[in-house]
Image (spheres, rainbow, N blue to C red):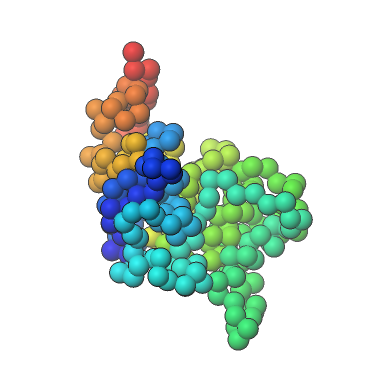
Amino acid sequence: MILEAHNLGWSVRGKPIVAGVDLVVNEDETLGLVGPNGSGKSTLMKLLAGIRRPTSGDVRVKGEALRAMPRPAVAQLIAFLEQQAETTEAITVKDAVDLGRTPWLTPLQPWSPKDDLIVAQALADTDMEGFERRSWATLSGGERQRVHLARALAQQPQILLLDEPTNHLDVQHQLSILDLVAKLPVTSVVALHDLNQALSCDRVGVLSGGRLVALGPPHEVLTVERIGAVFGVRASILTDPADGTHMFRFHPAS
């Protein structure tokens, strides 16, 4: 295990947003988190990233309490891609991706050609080559999302936390980003809106009302009965004739 949460919770004015979450993330796996709007996915991701301090429980990385670790050390281990991250600064795409190298730079170890190579690879992996000099303000929502992912990849983390990374992306780039994440030599926790995308994860956790109500292999966790209870819709399981994989089709609950 590389990342653990024990009785993790976060409340606002006494109202629990996330409560009693026990979670173990195994090294090199891709763990999907799904749940309806307001189920606590984004809050849980921020707690796991150390961005939000829990009101109960704790998070451990490689056995060490996250809250006790210096921020630069956390940033060398964990990269977090938020669902929405904007800036009003007049920066270029390369400026934004260069920020991913910040945790590794010190007065004794300034920027080097190695950092240029890492940034160039991150841009290539996210299909953003040729955009280096483009202004952030001129990018589409999907392009900005890919730049954010490139910045996270440039950070070279051991743990990658992605909060709905396919938001604003067209179908082609949704598939390419998820395929890239699955192939990266890192541990990934991915909050997803699309249950069909979650089927490709190693394991899936289901959040409802701020609690983790199920965790396990996708075909065991994402059952028709649980989808109905948690998401309030009827689901049918279909088989793709091209390769035999399963997928969901959804219907109103009535």
Instruction: Answer whether residue 232 is visible to the viewer in this image.
Output: yes
Reply above or below: 39 against 156.
Answer: above
Q: In which quarter of the image is the C terminus?
A: top left
Residue 214 horizontal/vertical position (percent): 25, 41
Q: In which quarter of the image is the N terminus?
A: bottom left
Determine the residue positioned at 54% across, 40% down: 167
Between residue 222 and residue 245, name the one nearer to us: 222
Determine the residue positioned at 46% across, 68% down: 74
Reply above or below: 58 against 251.
Answer: below
Determine the residue positioned at 57% across, 45% down: 84
Can you tell which quarter of the image residue 226 is in? top left
Residue 201 horizontal/vertical position (percent): 35, 47
Task: Classify residue 190 as left or right of residue 229.
Answer: right
Instruction: Answer whether residue 134 is visible to the viewer in this image.
Output: no
Task: Classify residue 141 as left or right of residue 61.
Answer: right
Residue 179 horizontal/vertical position (percent): 45, 50
Between residue 219 and residue 24, name the one nearer to us: 24
Reply above or below: 132 against 109.
Answer: above
Task: Classify residue 243 as left or right of residue 104.
Answer: left
Task: Classify residue 197 as left or right of residue 137.
Answer: left
Residue 161 horizontal/vertical position (percent): 45, 55
The outermost residue toward the top is 254
Reply above or below: 239 against 12.
Answer: above
Can you tell which quarter of the image residue 121 is in? bottom right
